[in-house]
Amino acid sequence: MSNITLKSATFDNKVKQYWMCLAAIFSLFPVVTIILLPVVLLLVWLVASRVLATMSADLLERKLVVKRGILFKEEKSIPLEKITDVGLSQGPLMRMFGLYRLSFETAGQSGHGALVSLLGVVDASEFREAILTQKDNLTAEQPVQAKQDEPPSQVELLRALTYSVKNIEQMLVTLLEEKR
């Protein structure tokens, strides 16, 4: 299997600002954390750069490889033929920053929601189209391969059985003639 990268995703630096806004919004709710808001924003700003630097998404010929994480590194390979949906979403705050979330759902996935989601992919719709195009290309190739791999039909099995029975009968006739 070839691991040639067809398209790589790059992530928009606006994700840091988006995360800071989310942190600010969540910090403003409880009155106690209002005092901690500058500390929380500083921590998010410092950590966000590192988190963003570790994020990657590479579209290969037969799979999508997503990597992320600082302390807990995570790598997921999603076979393209298993992808059932590639969602493109944008909430109100994301719209302010011009960000999109790509979410991937797969066949056989347990539970609700996306198996993997990517926030802040630059040209998210283009990356989504590249994934769907490559998935379609793979699907177009598969019927030829499936015919080679699919089990024989009942007619073919019946012919093979008939041929085998005729061979056995011929062998029995030959054995009987030799004994006489």
Image (tube, rainbow, N blue to C red):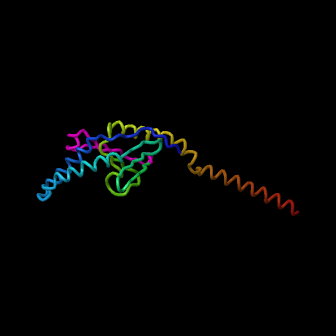
> In the figure, is residue 88 to the left or right of 145?
left
Number of numbered labels in the structure image? 0
Q: Position of residue 103 (x, y in %)?
A: 33, 47
4, above or below 109, in the image = above
Q: Position of residue 158 (x, y in %)?
A: 64, 52
Q: Which residues are magenta?
A: 79-102
Q: Position of residue 138 (x, y in %)?
A: 47, 41
Q: Position of residue 8 (x, y in %)?
A: 40, 40
Q: Quadrant of residue 71?
A: bottom left
Residue shown at 87%/63% (left/top)?
A: 179
- Residue 84, magenta (yes or no): yes
> In the figure, is residue 80 to the left or right of 53?
right
- Which residue of the protein is positioned furthest toward the left in this rendering? 31
Residue shown at 40%/37% (left/top)?
A: 130
Residue shown at 17%/50% (left/top)?
A: 24
- Residue 105, magenta (yes or no): no
- Which residue of the protein is positioned furthest toward the bottom in this rendering? 179
- Which residue of the protein is positioned furthest toward the right in this rendering? 180
105, above or below 6, in the image = below
Q: Which residue is at the front of the view, 143 or 30?
A: 30
Residue shown at 76%/57% (left/top)?
A: 169
Q: Which residue is at the front of the view, 157 or 125?
A: 125
Q: Specify the quadrant that holds the C terminus.
A: bottom right
